[in-house]
Image (tube, grey):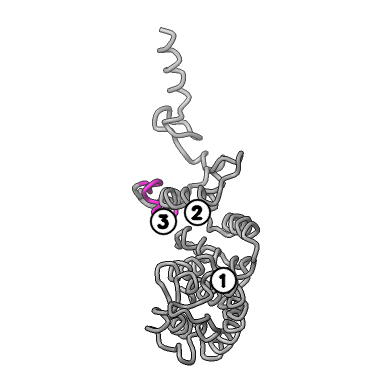
Amino acid sequence: MQKQFGRSSEIFKGMMKATFNSNEMVPSDIKDLFRCLLTPSEYDLWEGLWKKALKTVLQEIQQTPDAQDSDHNDITHDHLCGEGDLSSANEQIRLLSKSVLDKICNAAEKTFYQIPSPEIKTSYVNIKQFPSENFLQFVDRLRSQVERQVQDPVVQAELIKEMAQRNANETCRRIILSLPLDPSPSLAQMIEACTTRAELFSAPERNPGLTHPKPVAAAAPGPRRQPMSSDQLQHIICHHCKRPGHFAKACPENQKRKSKNQKN
């Protein structure tokens, strides 16, 4: 998840938040988690920043009813870091209240996002939808880059919508342009339209024979005959009137006979 969407993406942050909220984690668990997420050097940096943040947390706890552990001893920095005599996970579970553990987790999570991200950033401007890519997948790729590069959530939303419309493939762009302009469609409406109508709009491109059937091939025409010149016509003898200059079909006598029959 971290590798796919980036450390600062809302998707990854949501997964991290859910991990902490659904598990009552003690300092030992927290250390194990971040050893999995970080390189050894990153972990050393994170641990140093976390312990520093826990000094501030300790000052806050000392002003509350949670200032003592379950054995009625004052909470110390070692309590919060899980070190010294308190390095055992079982002891941490026994001695620390849930409210104290929550504060330790919050400090660990905030410190994690202070670690510089090693990810190579591709400008969100260059994220374009592939011809055969689902619009929803394209928006997810675009969102992950915007969230890595822009911190303001409001600006993020505006950029994602604008770039999704601008960098969509030809089929999805046509679908988006077919939506009502007043008010302008939301990102959710664009996603819904492109997801449900993409096949309809792209069908003529993939299967042109379905909408524009080819006519049955006729016999290949031969070379186009050129009209005969007046000199050539003089060698033609009409089989009807025996005069030169025309074929029997165009004989003047036939035209006269037709006119006479029409009058009668």
In space, the residues marked 3 and 1 are separated at their CA atoms by 38 Å
Residue positioned most to the front: 72
User: Are the two marked residues, 3 and 2, in contact with CB atoms closer than 8 angstroms?
Assistant: no
Q: Which amino acid does the dot numbered 3 rest on? A: Arg
Front in this rendered view, residue 91 or 248: 91
**Residue 210 colored in magenta in the image:** yes
- Residue carrying label 3: 206
> Residue at coordinates 54% horizontally, 43% vertically from top-left?
179
- Dot 1: within a 10 Å radius of its alpha carbon, few (fewer than 14), some, or many (20 or more) residues? many
- Residue carrying label 1: 8
In space, the residues marked 1 and 2 are separated at their CA atoms by 31 Å
Q: Is residue 263 above or below residue 233?
A: above
Q: Disc 3 or 1, which lies upstream in sequence?
A: 1
In magenta, the rendered stretch is 205-215
Rendering coords of residue 149 (x, y %): 63, 69
Residue 194 appears anywhere in the view: yes
Q: Is residue 6 above or below residue 118?
A: above
- Residue carrying label 2: 171
In space, the residues marked 3 and 2 are separated at their CA atoms by 11 Å
Where disc 3 sits, the SS reads helix
User: Are the two marked residues, 3 and 1, in contact with CB atoms closer than 8 angstroms?
Assistant: no
**Residue 39 colored in magenta in the image:** no
Q: Disc 3 or 2, which lies upstream in sequence?
A: 2
